[in-house]
Image: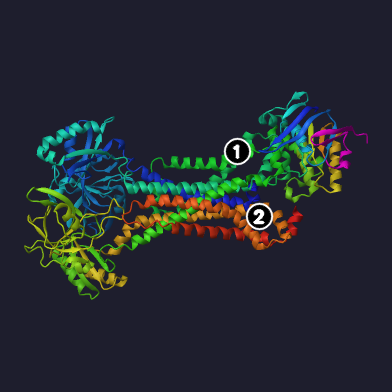
Amino acid sequence: MFKIFTSDLRRNIVKILCLTIGLAIGFVLVAKIYFEKTYDSFFPDSDRIYMVTEMAEINGEYKEFNQIPGGTAPALKRYIPQIEAATRFTYFVPDSKIKLHDDRSFDIEGVYLADSCLFDVFKTDIVEGDYKAVLSSQDGCMIPRSLAEKIGGDVMGMKFSVPSYHPTYEATIMGVYEDFQENTTLPRAIFIGLPTISRFYYDGSDNFAGNDRYVGYVRLAKDTDPKSLQSGIRKMLEDNLDKEMLDQYNFNHGLRPLLGSYTSQDGVKTMITMLSLLSVIILLSAGINYLLVTVGQFNSRAKEMAVRKCYGTGNAKLFMMVVGESLVYMVVSLMLALILISISSGLCEELLGTSIQQLFSVGRIWAVEGLVILVLLILTGVIPAWLYCKTPVSVAFRGNRKSKRIWKLAMLSLQFFSAGLLLCLLALVARQFKMMSNLDWGFDYENVAQINVSGLDPNEAKRISDGLKNLGIVQHTAFSDHDFFSYGDGNNIWVEETQEEMINVADLCYSNPEMIDVLGLRFTQGGNFVETADSTLHQVIVEERMIDVFKKFFGSDDDNLIGKTFKITGHDIIGDYTICGVIENMRRGGFEDSYADKRAGVIFPTSSSRGILFIRFTEMTESNLRSAQDEISKLLPDKELYISPMKTYIDYKLMNIRRFQKSVMVVGIAILIIALLGLIGYTSDEVQRRAKEIAIRKVTGTTDLKIIKLFCIDIVKVAFPSLLLGGEAAYIAGRHWLSQYTDQVSMSPIVFVLCVIALLLLISFVVSLNSLGVARSNPVNHLRNE
Amino acid sequence: MKIEVKNLEKVFRTDSVQTMALNNVSLTIEDGSFVAIMGPSGCGKSTLLNILGLLDNPTKGNYLLDGEEVGNLKERERTSWRKGRIGFIFQSFNLIEEMNVKDNIMLPLNNLNLSKEEKNKRVEEAMRRMGISHRSRHYPSQLSGGQQQRAAIARAIVSRPGLILADEPTGNLDSTNGAEVMEILNELHRDGATIVMVTHSHKDAAHADRIINLFDGQIVENLNNLM
């Protein structure tokens, strides 16, 4: 075997190299696809867990919401015997840091308030504590095992605070649960007992309507059809809610299966489709290149096989021999691929957003990867073995080099197709990324930074604001309840006469008037608040989108909104709000169409120093940021407050597309390498095969250039249509990928044509380089060999 | 091993062309004889040799080996028939480049149910007979043409076959090495092997008991060699 390997070292190294690259990238991509496809499936009885949704008719449109009132889930369990367990939980604190008494801080993935049935529905090992008792108590909490390990020692009874949000509040660790896997829609958070809610918010944990801040789940008994529970749901609603209200909004609850709730999202579906495309292409390219090299070796190996046949080796034995060789190559490549994956685990994590360890420890991932190897083995082992076995001995001895050329060209064209597809797709993704990076957000964030001061006393927050302004590097500061990036809270504009709620708008809550200067918001009508919320003017600033709202719901026939009034739910003042200014629309939510907040935004005035402090620097530099951070630490040495440029939030939102761009780039480069190696191998075979022909041409006066042209034209004839088809496939895949974004770059065919031309030039260059030797050689040598 | 061929035909078909490589060939080769097949290029010599060596089936006609009909065997059956019974010698030696001399010679024995000791004994014996024992660890590329052909002959005889088929065995050798190879074939013949040799060389053919001349796929001359 070793001699077989070394006898054609160059080709065999190419085989292993391409298989290694293909397996490494393919393995990671397949693992990621499996990871995404198996979201939440690790929970025991996950096929029987359903999310409780709320459905209501608003403005003639029937909508389904993921959040429900606090009383719904437990009531459903009481009314419907087929519900084995029900739970609800609600958001408390986002990703942040907790601080222990010994001043140590730890990153956490949020804090939630959950009821005592959480782990009845989402079963996981309880490492320590009685979760029922913990989650029924005030201030007691369950933490994930990974966090307990980071803290170290006996964590039970330890107290912690979340300084950035609730600096004075302390919760006590009373239990430890085994971490949920990363591929879950559930928060992998600290869960504090639900009764704690009354310390901070209105306690709506037993509501049946309003205060829809809870997420509810139920676990059904085996063989229960969720549709059959509709009468029980109806009965629960009729017993607990006013019939008039039920009829007015056509109010109801639904049960949405946990499994598939993640993968049914448009963005996830697109991601899985694109990753599948990339993985198939890379694995196929690696396999095809292996075949291409094997076919290149066919003549010499076929003679060996023929000799074996002459002396009585049967087809079955030959077949097993070739498959065995392929298996050895596969095992070597597999080991190298695993080494490559482990070396580049950081890059993989960066590209996929998931740790390699998690990717390869999910469910039956190794069975899936085994299947991938089996398919590759069939491609790389069975096909060559079949070729060798079916070739008659006499044909093998004759050594017909031309007979396998059509195979090689077919495989080469498939590789060109893949390279064309990937390069064109990469160009499209790069353009989209560039366009999204330069999008106008409706405000100027370049020199602006934020500090979350929601956990501070307003006087402390004001001290920071004043202190920063005195540094001389800050132009303006302002406070706001909203970060201006996220999806806005929802409140409804309503009409007093009919008490009808007309439309949901984005409530951007309260901001200081100085926010206009801090963010450089651009007025198209009117101007800033003339007084704050303390006055009786009840002014608001709205986005331009409000023009359409007024036209549609209030019969407005012009674009002028200044002085116009409306009522809105969720604000203390039960009266009219007057529009004092209209600003250009801002971009909120995500870039993806399904996450973009396209509702009209409303800003209310405040003079308070609370929420988020926005700081406009004269210039956003590292040293200015450091000076500001130092000043904050000096002013409030016992508080942990972090200043972050707004650009980091934009970068965070661009993370998904940046990851995809890099993934396409990595796969694209890998495929280009594989295709070029295949091309070099093919050209070398062709040069050898046509050596005599070229020699005769040279003898008869053909120039070196013409000979190179001869080889190039031969390849271009195959490459051009393949690349065009690849470009066409990229166009289709790209259109599908782009459809998830609100703003899309144009699908200009010129870019695709340019990519195809660039690849053609590269291919021609490689062919020219490879055929230069024979073109310049002395023809006599080749004729003598013959 | 006795060979009887009756009304043998072999037709090669491509999409547009049909070529009759062998046309109504009948011949008998007695056990222990040495037959040379001659004729111009493309007359069907190698095709006949391939059929005699059970590497290919005839399109029509009968082929009896030691009285048993083998003209219509399936590939698997032909392979099984060849095992240990037929030895091949090629013009271009066809040694496996990745194997050393000993492994090349061992090749036919790997398909026979023999003990390791027996295999080694036979290989040693074949190498000694061919005078290449000192080259057993060498690879084909490290041998001269004559040595390569000796190794190929050792491989052909190692399983002690009843029939040896040689396709221009001296075609790639100089006259000295060619003469040595023919001497070895004579020796094998004297030891009782049936030898069928395709050759262009009248000098080599002179070693045979009988010379068959082919032309356009037909036997045009079938003479006992009186020399």
* Label 2: element kind: helix
Label 1 Cα neighbours within 10 Å, binned few <14 / some 14-19 / many ≥20? some
Looking at this view, is A523 or A128 the one in front? Answer: A523
Q: Can residue B138 be spotted in the picture?
A: no
Q: Residue at x 22, y 75 (%)?
A: A471
Q: Amino acid at mark 2?
A: Val
In the depicted structure, whether residue A274 falls above or below residue B118: below
Residue B63, given in percent of the width and then of the height, sits at 76, 27
* Residue A687: mark: 2
Q: Can residue A658 be spotted in the picture?
A: yes
Residue A64, picture quadrant? top left
Coloring scheme of the render? rainbow
In the depicted structure, whether residue A444 falls above or below residue B138: below
Question: Label 1: which residue?
Answer: A386
Label 2 Cα neighbours within 10 Å, binned few <14 / some 14-19 / many ≥20? many
* Label 1: element kind: helix
Residue B170, given in percent of the width and then of the height, sits at 82, 44
A334 horizontally vs A191: left or right? right
Whether the residues at callouts 2 and 1 have beta carbons within 8 Å, the answer is no
- Range covered by the magenta-colored residues: B199-227
Q: Earlier along the polypeptide chain: callout 2 or callout 1?
A: 1
Residue A243, picture quadrant? top left
- Magenta span includes A593: no
Residue B167, picture quadrant? top right
Q: Amino acid at mark 1?
A: Trp
The N terminus of chain A appears in which quarter of the rendering?
top right
Chain label for disc 2: A
